[in-house]
Image: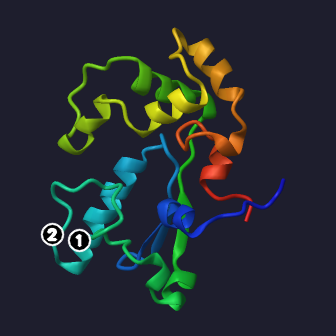
Amino acid sequence: MAVLKLKRWQLQKAVRFVPALGLIYVNNAKVACTSTKGALWKRSDEVLGCNTFPGRNPHVIEGAPWDGIFDCDKQMLLSAKIFTIVRDPHARLLSVYLSRFRERRSALPPHLEKRRTPGHFSKWYDRHIGDRPTNFPEFVRDIVKVPENARDQHVRPQWINILGPM
């Protein structure tokens, strides 16, 4: 396996260093990343005695407890514990298909409600694949035609999302 060549913005998007907790979370789409980032933010607020999270989107970088990863104390960064979460790849792919191409009748939190409209993934799918799939097997066949590194983070192999091998 080749070592990944990463750009600054890719690291900024993938890595969440929470100084108040001494933790580094490596984001992996469709693997409870919204819940994980929300929990980290809330716990950071508790430790710091502040309340910056309510009503915020946990995916934002600006104003979050992980703002400024490249400007933080390097010794703290080096001593932090690193973790990520992975998911069965088949269940993850099915989750993407169901959440993006099948109407769900669940009540979403306000910060996720906008996902009902075509977003980043839909635009990526239209640009790289085209016509929407009519069923899950068709979706899988379409996805595997796109090179792994060119896939959206939601359908790219998890080893790439979690920046491995490094």
Dot 1 crowding, Cα within 10 Å, few <14, some 14–19, many 20+: some
Classify residue 164 as left or right of residue 128.
right
Residue 25: % across, % down = 49, 63
Residue plotted at (43% across, 39% down): 120
Give SS at disc 1: helix
Please report the residue visible at 30 percent of the width from the left and 30 percent of the height from the top.
Answer: 117
Q: Amino acid at mark 1?
A: Asp
* Residue 61 circle label: none
Q: Is residue 148 above or below residue 132?
A: below
Q: Amino acid at mark 2?
A: Asn
Element at badge 2?
loop
Which residue was labeled with disc 1?
45
Q: CA distance from mark 1 to mark 2?
A: 6 Å
Q: Earlier in the sequence, mark 1 or mark 2?
A: 1
| Residue 90 on image: x %, y % | 61, 28
Disc number for residue 51: 2
**Image quarter hosting the C terminus:** bottom right
Residue drawn at point x = 72 percent, y = 27 percent: 145
The one nearer the camera, 106 or 103, is 103
Please state the total of marks drawn on the protein image.
2
Residue 53 occupies which quadrant of the picture?
A: bottom left
